Amino acid sequence: MTDEAQATPAAPLTVLAIGDVVGSAGRRALTRVLPQLRADLAPDLVIVNGENASGGIGINVRAVDEITRAGADVITLGNHAYRQHDVHRLLNDRETILRPANHLASQPGHGSCVVTTAGGTRIGVVNLQGNVFMESGRHAFSEIDAVIAKLRKQADHIIVDFHAEATSEKVAMGWHLDGRVSAVVGTHTHVPTADLRVLPEGTAYITDLGMTGSRAGVIGMERDASVRRFVTHMHQRYEPAEKDPWLMGVKLTLDPEVPMRALAIEQLLIPAS
């Protein structure tokens, strides 16, 4: 038997992408569930969106440390990236904490990184923010084209966290990037969508991962204040909800032989209480 015939096929790569961590309930859910997921699934990379981890708006240094200890390799953010001022230094200093790539170049941080797995595969991660109903420094579609042109020379696979409000913009981004990246996962709306699939040219896609936080509230926040705002049309002070925390996200299976191709995408909806 030849050496070639005896060669063992490379195992598929596993990436976990976890939806927006909201407040202390979200951090608690992540701390309870993610270590067991890492033990059971042995992922090559774990990406966690920490956009709402600190008090439900933004992320601070303490929340970064907590999310990292829970098992995140890369933390992505979004439109609240700069709300907690103590994290600004980390955005510049730590390459695996990402703010949207299409924020202004003058703002702290960077929008992409490349992580080399234990098996030697280079996985690029991009954080991107939508333009519809959101204030983004630059155009998302032209920005991602420029980022991909750079990362394709440095990475075997690319995962895009598209933090956007409009579902149409997210779906359009999936088609725009099909075959050019390994996965496009949406964040921001905190509601998990049922449209996960691998697109025709090999890109795994889901419109929104959902959130890691309390399902007892309104998209992670205390429900009474949220309901009062809709009923009265008056401003209300929001606080993160605490009860019934869940972890939400997806498991991505990537081709170990073919760059920028996903084999499968599976939903993770796990109660933490």
Image (cartoon, helix red, strand yellow):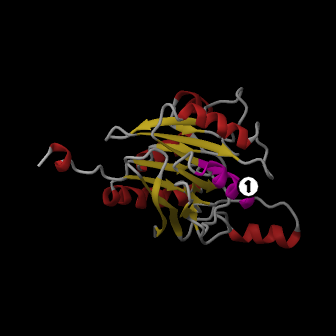
Q: What residue type is labelled 1?
A: Glu
**Residue 104 on image: x %, y %:** 73, 32
**Residue 126 on image: x %, y %:** 58, 41
Magenta span has 167?
A: yes
Say if 114 sits above or below 198 in the image. above
Q: Which residue lies furthest to the left in this view?
A: 1
Task: Name the residue rendered at 71%, 36% in the picture.
Answer: 103
Q: What stretch is highlighted in magenta?
A: 161-178
Residue at numbered disc 1? 169
Residue 40 visible at all: yes
Q: Residue 148 versus residue 139: which sits nearer the camera?
A: 148
**Residue 203 on image: x %, y %:** 54, 54
**Residue 188 on image: x %, y %:** 66, 55
Q: Residue 240 versus residue 257: which sits nearer the camera?
A: 257
Task: Name the residue rendered at 70%, 70% in the picture.
Answer: 223
At mark 1, the secondary structure is helix
Residue 56 visible at all: no
Predominant SS along the magenta part:
helix
